[in-house]
Amino acid sequence: MSDFSLLADDIRQKLPALELRENEPMKKHCSFKIGGPAALYALPGSVAELQALCALLREKGERPLVIGNGTNLLVTDETLRRVVIQTTGVANAKRTSETTVYVEAGMSLARAATLCASYGLTGMEFAQGIPGTVGGGASMNAGAYGGEMKQVLRSAAYLDGDVKTGVKAGQTLDLSYRHSAFSDTDCVVIGCELQLQRGDPREIDLKMRELAEKRRSKQPLELPSAGSTFKRPETGYAAALIEQCGLKGYAVGGAQVSEKHAGFVVNRGGASFDDVQRLMAHIQETVFAQTGVRLMPEVKIIKND
């Protein structure tokens, strides 16, 4: 089905409580502040509403783009001919035992870390500075400052390609560097159970403050970006290789290699999708030519097929 006006009417008829927007600018919902309008943009407020919407779209032959906070996306400036579903309204949480917490996918990692800290539970401090959601964090095994979701993710509930619910736990999560069993699939993570440990609330708070300050001092938070642009290569670090190649501060249009941290491409004002893509390609070509290392994007590139 490609007539999005008719599809919108059908969705509103069957899910009248769902917040649904037409031609919604994606740059409003992506930390890069880049992106043209999405044909349809939905904001479900519960797991049940999310599942009902996904089932309806599957029935109509539509493959939605499910996002969290949009913090690792580079989206085309053209009209995105897809239904985008933002999960941030699906964000409840509950303590399931003395040391486990179940968190719905749309809760931010920062809020989840703060919540766990309020229970006197340690293990999620690393996530306090990661700008994404719990669902996105589980899907890509997000990590920072020596921590990653693999260390705390006990299980994840999800919707499969047939919009049926399932749970993966332990080794079936297939967690490795920036990868999980959900990577590059049509599965949608809807909630995660986190396994934590009892800790000293003061030590937890101190560690979170230290990591927040470390992030503020080293990362270009003052400019729009999508976080780390490239994955860590097998040898060395992307930022060090980019700086070694003399690319710190290099710009294409409004996109620039951050002068503060070479691992970040930033939008210094008015950057386009094409600006960022061309800059990323130049970085990859230059680093490979000078070092023999192939950098792979960590940023997820979203465009029409």
Image: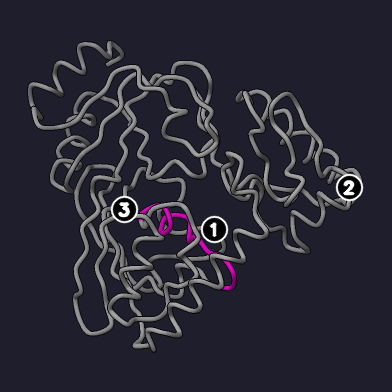
Task: Give neighbour class at mark 1: few <14, some 14-19, many 20+ (Cα, 10 Å).
Answer: some
Residue labelled with disc 3: 189
Label whose residue precedes the other's in the sequence (1 or 2):
1
Residue at position x 46%, y 70% from top? 150
Q: Nearer the viewer, mark 1 or mark 2?
A: 2
Mark 1–mark 2 distance (CA, rounded to whole Å): 25 Å
Residue labelled with disc 1: 178
Residue at position x 31%, y 55% from top? 107
Residue labelled with disc 2: 245
Q: Nearer the viewer, mark 3 or mark 2?
A: 2
- Relative depth, front residue between 183 and 53: 53
Mark 1–mark 3 distance (CA, rounded to whole Å): 15 Å
SS state under label 1: loop
Q: Position of residue 48 (x, y in %)?
A: 13, 46
- Type of amino acid under label 2: Cys
Q: Quadrant of residue 19?
A: top left
Q: Which residues are magenta?
A: 135-146
**Residue 159 sits inside the magenta stretch:** no
**225 left or right of 139 in image:** right
Query: Image height check: is 239 above or below 222?
Result: below
SS state under label 3: strand
